Amino acid sequence: MRMLLAITVALGAVVGTGPVFADAYNEVLKPGQTPEQHREDFRVYFKKKFPGVKFEDFSNGLYALPQFAAYRATWEEDMDFPPYEVGLERGKALWEKPFKNGKTFSDCFANDGRNVAHKYPYWDDAGQKIRTAEMDLIDCARKNGEALPFVDADLGKDQKARVQLAELTAHFYALARGQKIDIDLSQPGAKVAFEKGKQIYWSRRGQLNFACYQCHVDLAGHNLGGGQPLSAGLGHTTAWPAQRIEWARIETIHQRYATCFSQVRAKPYKHLGEEYNALELYEKFMSGGLPLTAPSMRN
């Protein structure tokens, strides 16, 4: 309720000051752009909005923004002994635990899973769909006959199974930590999926009639109160899976999307469904070139 009230107040305040939302919308979202042109305008927008922030620092989310220096100080202390280490260790143990057939998760990935996660999600032309890291990990377990809880769980409802998957995914991403995000849109289907994610990001929804960009583009750098500082859309997904302070557990980026949708009173999409997959593809591409920092702590 506190978050709902804060968003409502912020929306009313910003709308009351004039065309603040329209400025970002028209400046970044232009007809006929290629994905690369759209990304460049996105980067230029944030460079002008936060001129003192180096490009690579946007991978640190809200902690890169000068307005949140106090949050950064606390975050840096937390990162000395990050609370997510317990969950990450569980993810590593599961990654290394042999299946009944003697194989492990590493056998399902190129280079034993090292330095490949920065290319996720990707377009699978054979299956004509986006593949996320979570989807490939689930399929790996299934193909090797491992009946792990997350294999057939409803990830939107089964928190225990979802967190187990998030911890495993966190270890997979940790194997590529520091690699620059590199999303391939060369296939026609990938471009279609990108446009779908773009449409979701820039469209209003829910009873509050709010869009992703309004928080993470227009209101980036603002604090809605109650521990709700808003990060920039540039670098928004580089740390996920992540552990939020209030959650006290590692979670998937799709769970973060679901909570955002709920906060603006919109019905969340299905975890690992084409909508969230497309949104993740869009956000990751828009953060292309930034170093992968997952897993990390987030407010």
Image (cartoon, helix red, strand yellow):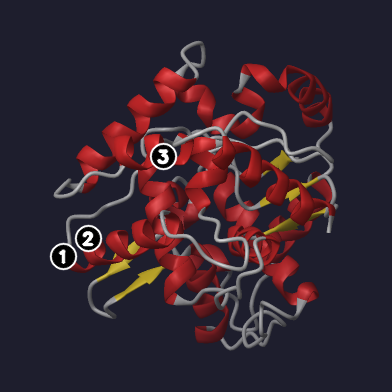
Circles 1 and 2, Cβ within 8 Å, touching? The answer is: yes
Tell me which numbered mark, 3 or 1, is placed earlier along the sequence.
Answer: 1
Q: Give the crowd class for mark 2: few <14, some 14-19, many >=20 residues within 10 Å.
A: some
Residue visible at 67% across and 85% down?
Answer: 153
Front-lying residue, 37 or 24: 24
Amino acid beneath label 3: Ser
Can residue 270 be seen in this snapshot?
yes
Secondary structure state at the residue bearing disc 2: helix
Instruction: Give the x, y percent position of residue 271.
Output: 57, 74
> Marks 3 and 2: CB-CB under 8 Å?
no
Residue 188 marker: 1
Marks 1/2: CA–CA distance: 5 Å
Query: Is residue 89 visible to us here?
Result: no
Work out whether mark 3 precedes mark 2 in sequence or the reverse, and give the earlier one.
2
Give how far apart the Cα atoms at labels 3 and 1 are: 20 Å
Residue at 34% from the left image edge and 44% from the top image edge:
182
Identify residue type, mark 2.
Lys
Q: Which residue is drawn at 76% across and 46% down?
A: 6
Q: Mark 3 points at which residue?
A: 287
The residue beneath circle 2 is 191
Inter-mark Cα distance, 3 to 2: 16 Å
Q: Which mark is residue 69?
A: none
Residue 138: x, y in percent? 55, 76
Please tell me how crowded label 1 is: few (under 14), some (14-19), or many (20+) other residues with Cα within 10 Å: few
